[in-house]
Amino acid sequence: MQEIVKNHIESILEKEVVLEKPKDISLGHFATPVAFSLAKEFRKSPMVIAEELASKFSESTLFEKVESVKGFINFTLSKSFLEEETNKALALKDEFAKENLKDEKILLEYVSANPTGPLHIGHARGAIAGDALARVGRHLGYDITTEYYVNDAGAQMDLLGLSLALAGQETILNLEVEYPEKYYRGDYLFDIAKEVAQELGTDIFTDESRQMELALFAKERVLELIKKDMADLGIVFDNYVSEKSLYSSWDSTKEILEKNGSLYEKDDKLWIKSQELGDDVDRVVVRDNGIPTYLAGDIIYHKNKYDRNYDRYINIWGADHHGYIARVKAAIKFLGNDPEKLEVLLAQMVQLLKGGEPYKMSKRAGNVILMSDIVEEIGSDALRFVFLTKKSDTHLDFDIDKLKNQDSSNPIFYINYAYARINQVFKKAEKSFENVVNISYENLNNDSINLVYESLLLPSILNEAFNKRDMQKITDYLYSLASSIHRFYNEHKIVGNEREDEYLKVLSLCSLSIKTSLNLLGIRPKETM
């Protein structure tokens, strides 16, 4: 709707315009400040220019009213246009706000947690943000592939093998174990140790030469846990890429970097000149023992990504990876690729409360709050919604007890209640959406018109949310729409009213907008409550 209105205004004014939504809807559904930008060129006051431009819309059927207000041109949409757009939306049903396939392929990588333990609540934020971004982007026509980068090489795998060996010695062999300062801990390792004993025997726990075998066994089991946790949140990845499998490409990758003069040796180490391209300092890519660093793995992986010829690459990383952005982009440039095609979004950590107190950490995980524990306690829908109520690069804290409230303080309850309430009204009226789809808007009152307008904003909300990588715009929209629906319901008798069918048609559009939005956020709308 908003795009249609914008194009129509620009065709009449023969100028590009910026459309705004007035805070007071009684002033109009849209407004443009274009007159202010023309004041110098026309040598007239914005008020005079706005009056002249507003008069050009006298024959337009899109608008009920176009007027100049303090230099702004305000547009009130016509009932006939709103009815036409409503009919299109209702006919589309699940395809509402869906756009044609765009000629842009995007590779979206997110979560990519080390396969050394179950996912914790911090991982959930990037996971939910990435999945929602993919869902919305695909609905808008983007060709999006989702990917999980499995960090199954390096020191963390050695530590995983050692940790599992010690867990097996303690729980299976009943030996006294002295744990080092750094190791992975948690009951999940004891569970894996039991599987190891059954499948590989118990001697492996004391055989240091077989610790990598233990690490690989644990990695596969942990990946199964991770995939299950993701599935419980409604998240399934298109690809899983192993870091270890990519290291066979290190020599050829290094050769390209050497030819470009971006590497040098110092202190028996190999360095990349990342400082030349915005990094704080140059970085080591090969240690003095000849083993490539974690950064080398990232360089190989991003070369692999670019070799697959996507138009854009989006990474969602934890906030602690902020320093990696410049060095990875520098490497991409040195490899002859365009670093501007890489977009890195950061997910801040989460503070979780229960009854106003810090949430207790999970014994099963060792020293973190397990994502699966929270999903079990409040459900995946509530967790997804609350994690999308703020942009992922901002701090988030929430109390899970509030997400159990059955009132407006619980946003997902409040929104679902609006959706279920509409279904209940139709049931009480003994009618279906199909019964009112052809009802005219000719006699629609202002409250109904404004509800239709708000519901039809969804396509522009989705585009803004995707383009700004900010799913909060959708959750804010949903809460606002739900508030409008509850207010409308409380202020108007619907069933038995002479306007019953008009009201029901308006509410069917509201229902469609809520259902579409929730589905795109990976949340199941509740038909009854």
Image (spheres, grey):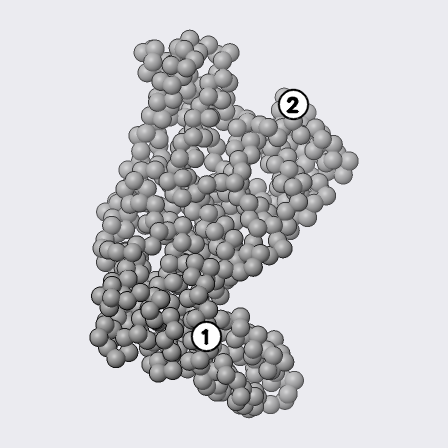
Query: Where residue 512 is drawn, which disc sits there?
Result: none
**Distance of label 1 from label 2 (alpha carbons):** 68 Å
Query: Where residue 290 is drawn, which disc sits there?
Result: 2
Using residue 24 as the reference point, say whether residue 6 is left or right of it: right
Look at 27% across and 42% down and name the residue there: 377
Q: Residue furthest front?
A: 435
- Toward the viewer: 74 or 178? 74
State whether residue 402 is above or below residue 65. Answer: above
Residue type, label 1:
Glu
Look at 62% across and 40% down and name the residue there: 305
Q: Position of residue 327 (x, y in %)?
A: 62, 42
Q: Position of residue 372 (x, y in %)?
A: 34, 37
Q: Is there any visible trace of residue 397 in the rendered image?
A: no
Q: Is there any visible trace of residue 207 in the rendered image?
A: yes
- The local crowd at label 1, few if under 14, some if 14 to 19, many if 20 or more residues have their Cα within 10 Å, is few
Q: Earlier in the sequence, mark 1 or mark 2?
A: 1
Look at 43% across and 43% down and name the residue there: 235
Q: Position of residue 360 (x, y in %)?
A: 28, 37
Looking at the rendered structure, the secondary structure element under dot 2 is loop
State whether residue 483 is above or below residue 236. Answer: below
Looking at the rendered structure, the secondary structure element under dot 1 is helix
- Toward the viewer: 123 or 445? 445
Residue type, label 2:
Gly
Look at 50% across and 50% down and name the residue there: 134
State whether residue 66 is above or below residue 381. Answer: below
- Find disc 1 in the rendering and name its residue: 84
Which of discs 1 and 2 lies nearer the camera? The answer is: 1
